């Protein structure tokens, strides 16, 4: 994030989870409740990711994401532009929905886009630290995210299927 800020001269606005919600979750369910069930995992994602995103999107008419159809079985039908079902009438724009991984790499190389150094260490998809591991050769690119769950459940709630 810091390299993006300095390279492009951007003001990056950071949103944190609600402190009280995190403290209550940890007091009631401990540090690792997200490993115990899909419901618990989605509860953690809702508190730490979805609620802050909702605050960030609140005043906006549209947002842009880097979702791509080939990233996972939950993203094969991602449209390039559509109303965001979670935040109507906001529009969600996914300009690289139809890009391949190679197209992304080519663009990064051509424009010298700063990338997370973990990508070079077999982390093609990166989320929170306790829910992300490197992948083995031949594994799906999202295999390192919530690896204890089935692929069709692997969304945190930021991007529900249309
Ligand atoms: S990715 Fe893991 S740690 Fe992060 S919010 Fe979701 S369940 Fe919690």
Image: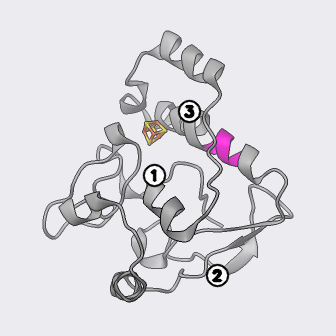
The secondary structure type at the circle numbered 2 is loop
Which is in the foreground here, disc 3 or disc 2? 2
Residue at 16%, 70% in the rendered image: 138
* Number of residues whose C-alpha sits closer than 10 Å to that of mark 3, classed few (under 14), some (14–19) or many (20 or more): some
Are the residues at dot 1 and dot 2 in contact (C-beta closer than 8 Å)? no
Are the residues at dot 1 and dot 3 in contact (C-beta closer than 8 Å)? no
Magenta-span inclusion, residue 51? yes
Whole-percent x, y for residue 68 in the image: 49, 75
Who comes first in sequence, dot 1 or dot 2?
A: 2
Q: Which mark is residue 43?
A: 3
Residue that mark 1 sits on: 153
Residue at 81%, 50% in the rendered image: 58
Whole-percent x, y for residue 49 in the image: 58, 42
Q: Which residues are magenta?
A: 50-54
Question: On the picture, is 101 further left or further right than 1?
Answer: left
- Ligand 1 falls in quadrant: top left
Who comes first in sequence, dot 1 or dot 3?
A: 3
């Amino acid at each position: 994030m810091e390299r993006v800020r300095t390279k492009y001269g951007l003001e990056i606005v950071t949103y944190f989870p609600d402190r009280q919600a995190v403290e209550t979750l940890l007091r009631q369910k401990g540090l690792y409740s997200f490993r115990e069930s899909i419901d618990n995992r989605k509860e953690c994602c809702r508190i730490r990711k979805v609620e802050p995103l909702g605050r960030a999107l609140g005043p906006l008419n549209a947002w842009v994401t880097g979702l791509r159809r080939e990233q996972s079985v939950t993203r094969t039908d991602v449209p390039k532009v559509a109303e965001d079902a979670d935040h109507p009438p906001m529009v969600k724009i996914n300009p690289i929905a139809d890009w391949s991984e190679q197209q992304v790499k080519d663009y990064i190389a051509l424009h010298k886009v700063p990338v997370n150094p973990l990508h070079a260490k077999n982390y093609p998809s990166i989320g929170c630290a306790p829910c992300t591991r490197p992948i083995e050769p031949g594994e799906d690119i999202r295999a390192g995210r919530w690896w204890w769950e089935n692929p069709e459940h692997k969304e945190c709630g930021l991007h529900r299927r249309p």
